Image (cartoon, rainbow, N blue to C red):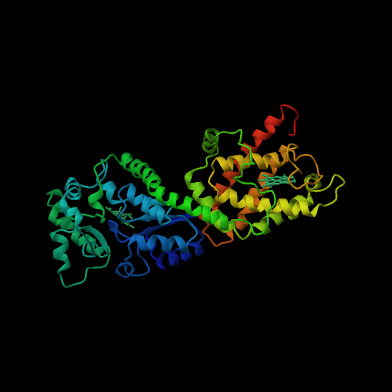
C-alpha cells in the first residue's frame, strides 16, 4: 500500500493533489493544512503560492469541513495555546516547525537561533527572492535588498543556488543580516528547550488549556443543556419515564466508583463532547433506531423476543410501544445527559427493570420475569455495530464519526458495568445471569 501525508493543503489545491494521489493508488491518511503564518516554504504545487495565502484560522476549518481524513494544522503554532486553537478549529494534530529551531539538537546555526531569540523575530516576511519559491523568514538586509531588485527571481531551485553562496558565507561569518533566517510569525513565542520538552509541553499545556478553555463553554452547555434536554425528549407521552424523580432509588454505585469506571473504560472529556455531537446526530432518528433493534433484530431471535411477549408467546403491543419510547429516550440520555447522580440512579433503575425486581411492573404486564444478564451484555455488540450508520448519516467526516462511535461504545461498556452491580447484588439470593 502506498501511503501519503499531503502537506500544504490550501482550499481547492490540496484536494486536487489528493485526487491525483488517489488515482495513482496512494492512500491519503492525513492532510497538513499549512497557514501562511508558517516558517520556510509551504507546499503549493498547482497554483502560485502568492495566490493561496490563507491564515490558519480561515484555512483549518475549511479543510476540516471538506475532507474525511485527519487534518494536521501547521503555521504559527509555537505553544499550547496554538495547539488548543488548532484543535478547536477541528484539526486532529499539529505540525510545528519554527519553535523546534530553537531547541537543542536543531540544525539551525547559532546566529539563526540568536535571531529567533531577538526582537527581529517579530518581523518576518514572505519572499521568493531566496529560493525562487515563496517562503517566510525573519526580515533582514538580504531579504529587503533582494526584494528591491527589479528582475524576478530564477525558478526554484536555481535562485536558491545563487543566493546560497551569500547565505552560506554569511552563516560561517555569523553575519545575520545576510543570512536566510527561516521563521514563522510566531517565532518570538518560541523558547529554548530540549526538543522532547517542546513536544511534551504544547500537549501538556494544551491539555490544561483545553480544560480551562472548556470550562465556560461547559458551564454554558450545562445551563443550555437543561433547555435542550426538555426539547430533546422523545415526542409523545412517556409513561414510567422517571428520570431525575424522587421515586428513583439512589444508586448503590457511588459517584467515585463511576469516576473510576470512566477511567477504566477510557471515557474522556473528549468522548463526552463527541457524545453530545452524537446526540445531535441521533436525535430525530431514535424511532428508527429502536425499531431496528427491537423489531428488526430482537423480534427475530425467539430467545430474546420472548421477553417482550406474554408467557404464551403472544405480542403485547402496549408493552413494546411504551418501553420502546423509553428506549428511544435512553439513546438521548446516553448522549446528552451529564453523567451525574441522577444519571447513575437511572442506570440502576433501567437495570432493575430488566430483572425480576422490576421487570413488567411499570407497564403492568405479564411477561418473562427477567432478561438474563448474559443476553444484555452480549447485545451490546449489536447495539454498537448497528449505531454506526446512524452516526454517519449527518455527513460528518469519517474521523468524527469514528470519534462519536468510540465514545458511544465506551459509554455502553460503562453502562453495562453499572448494570452488573444490580445483577451481582441479586445473585446473593438467586442468579439471573
Ligand atoms: C445493552 C443492552 C440493552 C440496553 C442498553 C437496553 C436498554 C433498555 C432501556 C433503556 C429500556 C427502558 C428502560 C426504562 O423503563 O426506562 C429497556 C427496557 C427493556 N428491555 Fe432492554 N436493553 C438492553 C438489552 C435488552 C435485551 C437483550 C433484552 C431482551 C431481549 C431487553 C429487553 C427489554 C425489555 C423487555 C424491557 C422492558 C422492561 C420493563 O418491563 O420495564 N433489553 N431496555
Ligand atoms: C527551517 C524550515 C524549513 C522548512 N522547509 C520546508 C520545506 O522545504 N517544505 C515544506 O513544505 N515546508 C517547509 N517548512 C515548513 C514546515 O514544514 C512547517 O509547515 C512550518 O514550519 C509550520 O509553521 P511554523 O514554522 O510556524 O511552526 C519549513 C519550515 C522551517 C522552519
* Image location of residue 98, percent across then percent down: 27, 51
Q: Quadrant of residue 250?
A: top right
Query: Is residue 384 shown left or right of residue 211?
Result: right
Q: Nearer the viewer, residue 69 or 88?
A: 88
Q: Residue at x 49, y 50 (%)?
A: 273
Quadrant location, the C terminus: top right
Compared with 105, 60 (above or below) is below
Q: Is residue 48 visible?
A: yes
Q: Nearer the viewer, residue 106 or 426?
A: 426
Query: Where is residue 84 drawn, in percent x and y?
Result: 37, 50
Q: Nearer the viewer, residue 58 or 348?
A: 348
Quarter-wise, where is residue 362 in the image? top right
Residue at 32% x, 56% y is: 75
Looking at this view, is 395 or 357 the one in front?
357
Task: Residue lying at the far right in this picture: please name it.
Answer: 312
Q: Is residue 1 visible?
A: no
Q: Is residue 40 left or right of residue 283?
A: left
- Residue lying at the far top in this picture: please name it: 428
Q: Count numbered badges in the picture.
A: 0
Which percent across, then down, holds residue 367? 81, 44
Say whether residue 340 is left or right of residue 87: right
The vertical placement of 246 against 292, above or below, is above
The residue lying at 23 percent from left, 61 percent from top is 160
**Residue 24 in the image: x percent, y percent?**
49, 62
Q: Tell me if residue 199 comes above or below residue 132 in the rendering.
A: above
From what the image shows, is residue 104 above or below residue 218? above
Instruction: Give the farthest residue toward the bottom.
Output: 150
Amino acid at each position: 500500500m502506498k501511503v501519503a501525508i499531503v502537506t500544504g493543503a490550501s482550499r481547492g489545491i490540496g484536494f486536487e493533489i489528493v485526487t491525483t494521489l488517489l488515482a495513482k493508488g496512494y492512500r491519503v491518511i492525513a492532510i497538513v493544512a499549512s497557514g501562511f503564518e508558517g516558517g520556510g516554504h509551504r507546499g503549493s504545487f498547482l497554483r502560485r503560492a502568492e495566490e493561496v495565502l490563507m491564515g490558519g484560522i480561515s484555512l483549518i476549518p475549511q479543510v476540516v469541513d471538506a475532507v474525511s481524513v485527519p487534518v494536521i494544522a501547521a503555521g504559527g503554532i509555537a505553544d499550547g495555546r496554538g495547539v488548543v486553537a488548532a484543535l478547536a478549529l477541528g484539526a486532529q494534530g499539529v505540525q510545528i516547525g519554527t519553535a523546534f529551531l530553537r531547541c537543542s539538537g536543531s540544525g539551525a546555526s547559532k546566529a539563526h537561533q540568536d535571531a529567533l531569540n531577538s526582537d527581529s523575530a517579530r518581523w518576518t516576511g514572505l519572499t521568493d527572492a531566496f529560493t525562487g519559491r515563496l517562503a517566510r523568514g525573519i526580515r533582514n538586509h538580504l531579504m529587503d535588498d533582494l526584494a528591491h531588485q527589479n528582475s524576478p527571481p530564477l525558478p526554484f531551485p536555481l535562485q536558491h543556488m545563487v543566493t546560497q553562496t551569500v547565505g552560506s558565507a554569511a552563516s560561517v561569518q555569523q553575519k545575520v543580516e545576510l543570512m536566510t533566517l527561516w521563521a514563522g510569525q510566531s517565532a518570538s513565542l518560541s523558547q529554548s528547550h530540549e526538543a522532547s520538552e517542546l513536544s511534551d509541553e504544547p500537549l501538556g499545556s494544551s491539555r490544561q488549556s483545553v480544560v480551562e478553555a472548556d470550562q465556560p463553554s461547559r458551564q454554558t452547555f450545562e445551563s443550555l443543556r437543561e433547555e435542550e434536554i426538555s426539547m430533546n425528549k422523545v415526542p409523545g407521552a412517556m409513561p414510567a419515564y422517571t428520570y431525575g424523580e424522587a421515586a428513583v432509588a439512589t444508586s448503590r454505585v457511588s459517584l467515585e466508583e463511576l469516576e473510576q469506571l470512566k477511567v477504566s473504560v477510557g471515557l474522556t472529556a473528549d468522548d463526552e463532547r463527541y457524545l453530545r455531537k452524537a446526540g445531535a446526530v441521533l436525535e430525530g432518528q431514535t424511532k428508527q433506531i429502536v425499531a431496528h433493534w427491537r423489531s428488526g433484530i430482537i423480534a427475530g431471535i425467539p430467545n430474546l423476543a420472548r421477553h417482550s411477549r406474554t408467557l404464551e408467546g403472544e405480542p403485547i403491543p402496549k408493552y413494546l410501544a411504551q418501553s420502546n419510547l423509553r428506549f428511544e429516550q435512553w439513546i438521548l440520555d446516553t448522549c446528552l445527559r451529564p453523567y451525574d447522580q441522577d444519571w447513575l440512579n437511572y442506570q440502576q433503575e433501567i437495570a432493575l427493570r430488566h430483572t425480576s425486581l422490576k421487570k413488567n411492573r411499570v407497564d403492568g404486564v405479564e411477561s418473562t420475569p427477567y432478561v438474563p444478564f448474559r443476553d444484555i451484555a452480549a447485545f451490546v455488540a449489536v447495539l454498537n455495530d448497528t449505531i454506526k450508520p446512524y452516526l454517519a448519516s449527518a455527513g460528518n467526516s469519517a474521523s468524527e464519526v469514528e470519534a462519536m462511535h468510540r465514545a458511544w461504545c465506551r459509554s455502553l461498556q460503562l453502562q453495562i458495568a453499572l448494570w452488573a452491580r444490580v445483577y451481582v447484588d441479586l445473585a446473593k439470593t438467586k442468579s439471573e445471569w
